Amino acid sequence: MRKASMCSLRWGGLFRVPLPVFVPVVSLCLLILSPEALCESWEPFGPEGGNFIFSMSHPEDANEITAITSGPSPPNVYKSTDGGASWSKIGEIPYPYVSDVSAFDFSTLYAISGFSCFRSMDGGATWTESRLPQSAGWAYRVCVDPTDSSKVYAAGYYSDYSNNTFTDSMVIFKSTDGGLSWNASQFFTYEHFYPYDMAISATNPNVMYVVGSKEVNDQYGGALMASTDGGQTWTDISSDLTTEPYSRFQCVAIDPTDDGKVYVGGEYIYRGTRTGRTQELVWTHGPTRLYVNTISIDPVDPSRIYAGAYESIAVSTNFGLSWNLRSNCIKSSAGHIAVAPADPSTVHVSAYTGFYKSSDSGSRWATAHGGIRAASINALAVDPSVIIAHNSGYLMAHGRGRSNTWEDVVTPESCGQVCDILINPDNRNSVLILEGYG
């Protein structure tokens, strides 16, 4: 009897199960087998990749890497011992969604999600949950003190509705026992506030920054908050940077050897340095708009800095005074950059569409997520000869009956979320795509 296959769209990629072509037998099997039995027969077949949100490499072995994806639900933790050539799943964070991860070392990690913090003491294999005070607001970014793993901070916001008006306050959550218990404090009040990143100085842990977006008098702009007393008090220094209307600050990084060098990414890459008798930060930025999402500093040579933007990685070798842009080297926007301490020429980028690696300090990039199938697919069309899937903002095609590989196809300019894909049954070269919001 000839065999066919049935494709299914599930969170984390595509799955298939062999099915007999003879329809009456199929119907009989469906009547006898339980749903659980059918699900046990499914096997993932791609595409490879997914939404990677974090990675780190062993401080003494650049080939040993831990990477975390946001799905399939719950978020998965993978490990590679051969520089990303192959991977094995070692654990999962017991929650449907995680917004941020921070590591103290290769063993101690923290993950944040709304009202919960998760801690792993074994490199991501197992996790324990602690609850944040729910009445204080939501936490979205987490950062561990680089000198003391018992001190953990999270940034979030609290929304208040009174007098027919919504207002947001910045909330700083703090734990002094390794994330087991938390307290929270509110700072500032805006029409809107959202934190995108936070950083703590390795040379002076009392110095920390939170960046994001805020709305004041119906005008959106970047938010930059600074604390010099371990988060007890904060100052809004957003106006110190030359900003454009409706901009936002996406990321912040502090030189690991000098807290007087600070870098903020957004529409531009901003460079702050302490000068003069007052040692106040003076900010400058280059003329090129890069719309940076993430910044990472080489832990061995802090003059080398990496900045991730949409499908691009920028590299500076002179403390951010100038940048070399490598365009079209990754798919989608970079979400997290990690430089290997044991071999700083090795750099990893976690992105919405996959995991990328450079072995030459950012000059060349290649995918390094082979075997990981955690893609976010929201639209699918199946034809006798081809499968077309919308994978994290990109269209991919799988030639059925040829090889088990996926190829990129032309993706039209998007006006919204792809909702459905249709292949003309009379002309398989004719494909319709439905897009929209809501």
Image (tube, grey):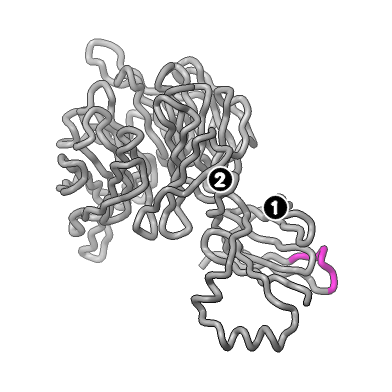
Q: Nearer the viewer, residue 235 or 153?
A: 153
Looking at the rendering, which quadrant does residue 265 occupy?
Answer: top left
Residue 209 within the magenta-colored segment of the rendering: no
Task: Tell me residue 155's x, y (percent).
Answer: 28, 44
Q: Write the residue at 76% across / 65% down.
A: 431
Above or below, 265 against 54 in this view is: above
Above or below, 9 against 369 in this view is: below
Task: Tell me residue 287's x, y (percent).
Answer: 53, 25
The N terminus: image quadrant: bottom right
Q: Write the residue at 45% across / 32% down.
A: 338
Task: Tell me residue 117's x, y (percent).
Answer: 27, 50
Q: Which residues are magenta?
A: 426-431
Residue lying at the far top of the rendered structure:
277
- Disc 2 marks a residue whose amino acid type is Gly
Task: Tell me residue 112's x, y (percent).
Answer: 31, 49
Instruction: Residue 354: give its label.
Output: 2
Instruction: Residue 406: give its label.
Output: 1
Q: Is tag 2's residue or tag 1's residue first in the polypeptide sequence?
A: 2
Disc 2/disc 1 C-alpha distance (Å): 14 Å
Q: For the residue carrying disc 1, how many other residues have a C-alpha within 10 Å: few (<14), some (14-19), or many (20+)?
A: some
User: For this view, does 165 lie left or right of residue 296?
Assistant: left
Callout 1 secondary element: strand
User: For this view, does 67 lie left or right of residue 20?
Assistant: left
Q: Write the residue at 59% across / 60% down.
A: 44
Residue 429 within the magenta-colored segment of the rendering: yes
